[in-house]
Image: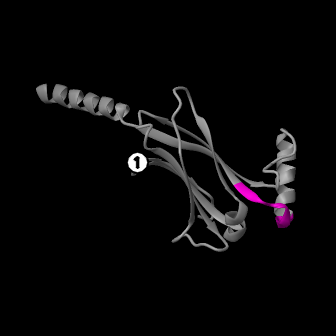
Amino acid sequence: MRSGWFMMIAMCLHLCIGAWAGSGRVIKVLPHLLDAKGRHALSPSLYDRDAYQAELRANPDLCHGLRFDVQWKARRVDAETLSIKVELVTSETTRDKPLVLQQAVKPSWLGSRWAKLVLDGGEFKQAGGLVAWKVSLWEGETLLDSEQSFLW
């Protein structure tokens, strides 16, 4: 009987400690091509955004940048060491040596947040065409979560 109570207390303690550990999640990743004015759409309409993105993909000479909009959330983490990293495989790089964009972020008290990581200018032209991407949320050296494209 005592060993049963001991096991139940140990399990409750384990669950409570696990609930207080830091956690984070990458919810959504939206890669967008940008035109010369830094726009990914001509109007707020999702239909217009998708149409303009198709136009930019069809006419690479109109593209002057690439932006990753990343929706994420994190709780009970060290806000000073929290960052988002985007690794890109392009026509000029490989998965072993990807092009890396990284940005420090601050968690929100309520819900999720969005981060925008941009590759533009000469770096965008040198990178070549996008093949695959991987987005990860980091607390210092600890990986909290990641999302990747199908070809990663």
Is 18 on the left-hand or right-hand side of 107? Answer: left
Seen from the viewer's position, the closer of residues 141 and 131 is 141
Q: Quadrant of the C terminus?
A: bottom right
Q: Which residue of the protein is positioned furthest toward the left in this rendering?
A: 2
Residue 75: x %, y % from top left = 45, 33
Residue 63: x %, y % from top left = 80, 61
The image quadrant of residue 54 is: bottom right
Instruction: Kindly identify the residue that appears in the image at 67 percent across and 73 percent down.
Output: 91
- 102 within the magenta span: no
Tally of marks: 1
Is 52 on the left-hand or right-hand side of 127? Answer: right
Crowding near pointer 1: few (<14 within 10 Å), some, many (20+)? some
The image quadrant of residue 12 is: top left
Question: Which residue is the site of mark 1?
Answer: 140
Residue 147: x %, y % from top left = 56, 52
Seen from the viewer's position, the closer of residues 36 and 87 is 36
Q: Amino acid at mark 1?
A: Gly
Is 132 on the left-hand or right-hand side of 32? Answer: left
Q: Which residue of the protein is positioned furthest toward the front in this rendering?
A: 122
Image colouring: one colour
Instruction: Kindly identify the residue that appears in the image at 67 percent across and 67 percent down.
Output: 131
Callout 1 secondary element: loop
Q: Give, as a single range, the part of the protein colored magenta.
A: 59-66
Residue 2's place in the image compared with 72, above or below, is: above
- 64 within the magenta span: yes
Instruction: Kindly identify the residue that appears in the image at 43 percent across and 39 percent down.
Output: 80
